[in-house]
Image: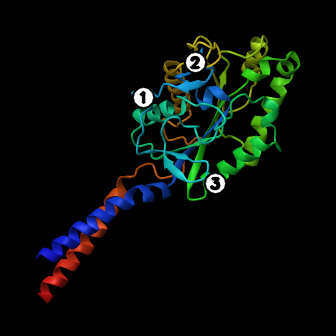
């Protein structure tokens, strides 16, 4: 009976090794993360006062820990386990740290353990203006390319998480034209994704790289679109540069994103536009990958027993 036992161990081992790849093929609840540095994540990034070189302290709070149910679309358009720094291979010209994405996903799953697999699509690039995100630009095309790739093997785009505008506070002209450009950007995204009611959660600035912060904030608060929600980051603690959110602030922002998103979900029989067609629970899949090899193993044992 040594041989059948060997086959049993081999098959079970193979079954468990297949599980991560199979999970990646399931329908995912997909979230686009776009904008500039504060959503890319600079929590824990500090500039050395002597060398002037920025470094990340490497501290990952428990709220941002990896979770088997949270995947990320990598720079080469493959699904991998999500972990901080989430944007390291996207915003690669900058030093990345903790952002709100992982905290957001973990909070959503904490509130709704049956939500299903979350697929994060990082697209943010630090230091970018709203004009660099207009339809037809490189950043816009890249975001669309990544978003379209994210649904190829199944999934539903649940929301756009957007945090941008710090760079548009440097010029009064940019600040005054910000509202019209941002509104057009949101409408273009919905139009190109063929999702006119796509939920969008944007962040009102906590800081800026110029003196016209309030003009941009007023523009953000003044946009009135269906299924658009604005969360206010003003007052969240900043790093020593007075521009980027601290790690603790990023965790808080992730929770704010999650609380706002969860309000979109239906609480009763009414189905909202955000309702996902993706599988909500991976338990059936886990049962299938374990039971199928078990039945195969039993048949093999019976067959080998007859031979012996």
Residue at 16% across, 77% down: 3
Q: Earlier in the sequence, mark 2 or mark 3?
A: 2
In which image quadrant can residue 94 be found? top right
Residue at 45% across, 48% down: 280
Q: Earlier in the sequence, mark 3 or mark 1?
A: 1
Q: How is the image coloured?
A: rainbow
Where is residue 187 drawn, in percent x and y?
77, 38
Residue at 25% across, 72% down: 295
Judge left or right: residue 281 versus residue 215.
left
- The reply to whether the C-beta atoms of the residues labelled 1 and 2 are less than 8 Å apart is no
Residue 281 is marked as none
Q: What residue does disc 1 label? A: 63
Q: Earlier in the sequence, mark 1 or mark 2?
A: 2
Q: What residue does disc 3 label? A: 149
Q: In the structure shown, which secondary structural element does the residue marked by tag 2 occupy?
A: loop
Q: In the rendered view of the protein, which quadrant contains the C terminus?
A: bottom left
- The reply to whether the C-beta atoms of the residues labelled 2 and 3 are less than 8 Å apart is no
Residue at 19% across, 84% down: 303
Where is residue 73 drawn, in percent x and y?
57, 48
Residue closer to the observer: 221 or 293: 293
In which image quadrant can residue 162 be found? top right
Q: What residue does disc 2 label? A: 48
**How many labels sit on residues?**
3
């Amino acid at each position: 009976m040594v041989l059948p036992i060997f086959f049993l161990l081999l098959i079970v081992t193979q079954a468990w090794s297949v599980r991560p790849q199979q999970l990646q093929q399931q329908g995912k609840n997909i979230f686009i993360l776009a904008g500039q540095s504060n959503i890319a994540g600079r929590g824990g990034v500090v500039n050395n006062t002597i060398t002037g070189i920025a470094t990340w302290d490497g501290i990952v709070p428990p709220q941002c820990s990896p979770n088997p149910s949270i995947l990320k679309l990598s720079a080469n358009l493959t699904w991998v386990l999500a972990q901080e720094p989430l944007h390291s291979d996207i915003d690669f010209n900058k030093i990345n740290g903790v952002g709100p994405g992982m905290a957001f996903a973990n909070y959503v799953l904490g509130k709704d353990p049956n939500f299903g697999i979350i697929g994060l699509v990082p697209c943010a690039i630090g230091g970018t203006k709203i004009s660099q995100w207009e339809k037809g630009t490189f950043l816009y095309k890249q975001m669309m390319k990544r978003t379209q790739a994210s649904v190829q093997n199944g999934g539903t785009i649940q929301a756009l998480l957007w945090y941008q505008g710090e760079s548009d506070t440097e010029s009064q002209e940019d600040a005054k034209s910000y509202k019209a450009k941002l509104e057009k950007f949101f409408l273009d995204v919905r139009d190109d994704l063929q999702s006119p009611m796509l939920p969008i959660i944007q962040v009102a600035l906590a800081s800026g790289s110029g003196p016209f912060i309030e003009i941009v904030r007023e523009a953000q608060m003044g946009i009135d679109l269906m299924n658009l929600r604005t969360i206010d980051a003003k007052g969240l603690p900043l790093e020593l540069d007075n521009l980027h959110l601290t790690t603790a602030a990023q965790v808080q922002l992730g929770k704010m994103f999650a609380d706002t998103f969860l309000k979109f979900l239906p609480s009763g029989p009414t189905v909202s536009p955000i309702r996902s067609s993706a599988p909500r629970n991976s338990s059936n899949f886990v049962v299938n990958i374990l039971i199928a090899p078990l039945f195969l193993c039993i048949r093999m044992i019976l067959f080998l027993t007859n031979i012996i």
